[in-house]
Image: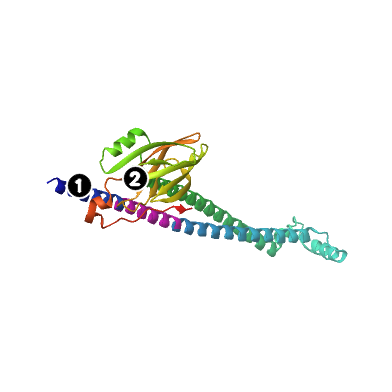
């Protein structure tokens, strides 16, 4: 009777672990899809913004050239006439009525046409600048919205992943009460000597209190491994030959030349589970071997 209950507990534990992995996998896939769609949308908006900028520069160049041409024409119209031209102009003045003469610049059709072109170009440039500013504001708003959405998704995923990490002694006790894994708390001081903690032998080699990180050496299945620049609360996963799931190491306190944390391992070994451990889950990332 006890054997059947234990087998039921093993199956239930495997199902819970499988459900958790599927849930985290779906959360990561959803996050990647949202990020891809957002980046594609932002890329398209940036292309439109660059196109508007190019149009703005082209219009500005056209207006500058028109102003230069108008100034050159005005200079020619306002330039004093040559002696022969002055005689012709005086004769024309005598023949005309004694009304007030019109401005030569205003009477020249080329000058009037150029003024009209300049006015139209300025209106078009003003409209383009308004569109450019509106597009920039829309793009900035969408970027902020996408950034907030991605930040919220990352925070949600991080919370789900960190739900199984004990940040304090009370958290470790709460995790241990679940009965799914064995937990071994430890406190290490910087040393070249190794200390046995649960299924591992550990040696603290370096501590960076400013960056809240540490370097650790360990013996895993009689092989010496090392892990460098590990952050506070960052889970370290180690694969052991006789464990159906990876062993987890977490440091939740970092002080001067010392760290505190815990190691958790599956409650039962493969040899104890027998056939129930035949379906081994995917391995966690390994370590650099010396």
Task: Identify the residue position indicated by label 2 in the image.
Answer: 160
Name the element at disc 1.
helix
- Residue ID at (40%, 38%): 261
Q: Look at the image and give the residue range highlighted in magenta.
A: 22-39
Residue assigned mark 1: 9
Residue 123 appears at what percent x and percent y?
58, 56
Q: Nearer the viewer, residue 76 or 44?
A: 44
For discs 2 and 1, the disc positioned in front in the rendered view: 1
Q: Is residue 208 above or below residue 85?
A: above
Vertical arrangement, residue 88 with respect to residue 155, above or below:
below
**In-image side of 128 versus 202 (left or right):** right
Residue 33, magenta (yes or no): yes
Q: Does 278 sit left or right of 1 as displayed? A: right
Q: Secondary structure at mark 2?
A: helix
Q: Of the numbered discs in the image, which one, if any, rests on residue 265?
A: none
**What is the crowding at mark 2: few (fewer than 14 residues within 10 Å), some, or many (at least 20)?**
some
N-term-proximal mark, 2 vs 1: 1
In the depicted view, which residue is nearer to us: 290 or 222? 222
Q: Who is closer to the viewer here, 63 or 231?
A: 231
Q: State the predominant SS element of the stretch in magenta.
A: helix
Along the viewing direction, whichever of 155 and 287 lies nearer the viewer = 287
Residue 76 against residue 256 in the figure, above or below: below
Please state the horizontal and vertical placement of residue 42, each as a whole percent of the image.
47, 55
- Residue located 80% across and 61% down the image: 93
């Amino acid at each position: 009777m006890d054997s059947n209950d234990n087998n039921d507990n093993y199956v239930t534990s495997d199902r819970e672990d499988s459900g958790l992995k599927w849930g985290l996998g779906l959360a990561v896939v959803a996050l990647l899809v949202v990020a891809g769609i957002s980046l594609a949308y932002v890329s398209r908006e940036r292309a439109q913004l660059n196109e508007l900028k190019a149009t703005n520069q082209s219009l500005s160049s056209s207006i500058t050239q028109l102003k230069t041409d108008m100034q050159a024409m005005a200079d020619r119209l306002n330039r004093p006439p040559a002696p022969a031209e002055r005689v012709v102009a005086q004769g024309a003045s005598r023949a005309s009525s004694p009304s007030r003469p019109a401005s030569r610049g205003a009477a020249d059709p080329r000058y009037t046409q150029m003024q009209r072109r300049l006015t139209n170009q300025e209106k078009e440039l003003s409209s383009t600048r308004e569109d450019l500013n509106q597009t920039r504001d829309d793009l900035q708003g969408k970027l902020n919205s996408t950034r907030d959405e991605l930040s919220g998704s990352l925070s949600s995923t991080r919370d789900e992943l960190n739900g199984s990490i004990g940040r304090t002694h009370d958290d470790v006790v709460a995790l241990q009460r679940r009965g799914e894994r064995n937990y071994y708390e430890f406190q290490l001081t910087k040393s070249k000597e190794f200390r046995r903690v649960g299924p591992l032998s550990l040696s603290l080699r370096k501590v960076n209190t400013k960056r809240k990180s540490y370097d650790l050496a360990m013996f895993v299945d009689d092989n010496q491994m090392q892990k460098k620049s590990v952050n506070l609360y960052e889970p370290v996963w180690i694969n052991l030959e006789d464990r159906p799931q990876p062993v987890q190491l977490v440091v939740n306190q970092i002080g001067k030349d010392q760290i505190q944390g815990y190691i958790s391992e599956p409650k039962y070994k493969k040899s104890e589970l027998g056939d129930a451990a035949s379906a081994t889950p995917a391995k966690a990332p390994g370590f650099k071997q010396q």
